Amino acid sequence: MARGDWRRFDESDVRVRPGKSTRPRSKRRPTHADAVPAMVTSVDRGRWRCAVESDPGRAVTAMRARELGRTPIVVGDRVHLVGDVSGKPDTLARIVRVEERSSVLRRTADDTDPYERVVVANAEQLLIVTALADPPPRTGFIDRCLVACYTGGLDPVLCLTKADLAHPDELLAEYADLAVPAVVTSHDGDLGELVDRLSGRVSALVGHSGVGKSTLVNRLVPEAGLATAEVSAVGKGRHTSVSAIALPLPGDDGGWVVDTPGVRSFGLAHVTADDIVGAFDGFAEAAEECPSGCGHLGPPADPDCALDDVEGTGARLASLRRLLASRAGLDP
């Protein structure tokens, strides 16, 4: 080619070497329109046990699909499955979708732990199982569970066990102003009232080890086969449940109980004072008038708290502030 002849060429004369594939890359992903709805009933080392929505008696073992990445999936989550959903031994399905949660029960190991643990998803109510004696009731623990309910979207229910050892009136009076419903049970006593409250709903149970929670679950679901243990000498018992598990209630009305591991503490590092106040009608609006940084505890800590200006709520405000004090790790 003579000097200067290159000016006679343009871009149309240049041959572009094709890449390894000339097929355009698509961002579209499978819709999985035929995925089967199910509910997660247990989790164990990267495998999820799921109950198929149309046939709750069919238990399917599934893995998390690659496209979900590290999406957290816990007991109570409503998911969609593809693959082998027969539930036969040695079969494995895939979880390809997780529905938005209607409620979440969260806790941290303690009030300084930044790591938030989701215990149960989509439960409608939380039964706070508390023994009236052996071990004695701990109102601080109950208060913290109430905070978790109010901020997580669950209805709280006090479930008081061992009524044959102590009378429940004094403890019930502590929560009368918060209008928390309660069910009282005793050893071998009738569970009709409790069964009525659980029927047709997804209910989680939480409580200290040794309060009789697993024993109660065994009575509600006889085939559960959960281990029970005697209360230890220190009064906190042995941990008889090591992970959450959802169990179907017998009877035509259906429903599920989710037994959670016995806990020694219920951390609320993820909850703020405003989160708690926001769950109470009448106080949430008043809190907007509080000065910045107000903890809503009232004098002397918060002398200008606007909650004091809400009329006719003295007893209810005192109960609310007890919850706030419990969240802050203070004595009420």
Image (spheres, rainbow, N blue to C red):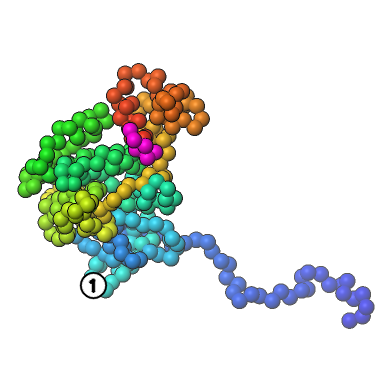
**Residue sitting nearer the eye, 235 or 196:** 235
Query: Is residue 72 part of the magenta span, yes or no?
Result: no
Relative to 12, residue 276 above or below = above
- For this view, does 186 lie left or right of residue 107? left
Relative to 242, residue 295 above or below = above
Question: What residue lies at 31% left-to-right and 70% top-to-bottom?
Answer: 92
Instruction: Determine the image quadrant of residue 2.
Output: bottom right
Query: Is residue 327 part of the magenta span, yes or no?
Result: yes
**Residue sitting nearer the eye, 172 or 18:** 172
Q: Which residue is mark 1?
A: 89
Instruction: Determine the image quadrant of residue 171.
Output: top left
**Residue sitting nearer the eye, 300 or 31:** 300
Point out residue 97 in the picture as x, y percentages from the top left corner: 38, 57
> Which region shows up in magenta?
326-332
Question: What residue lies at 32% left-to-right and 41% top-to-bottom?
Answer: 144
User: Crowding near pointer 1: few (<14 within 10 Å), some, many (20+)?
Assistant: few
Instruction: Determine the image quadrant of residue 269.
Output: top left
| Disc 1 residue type (three-letter) | Pro
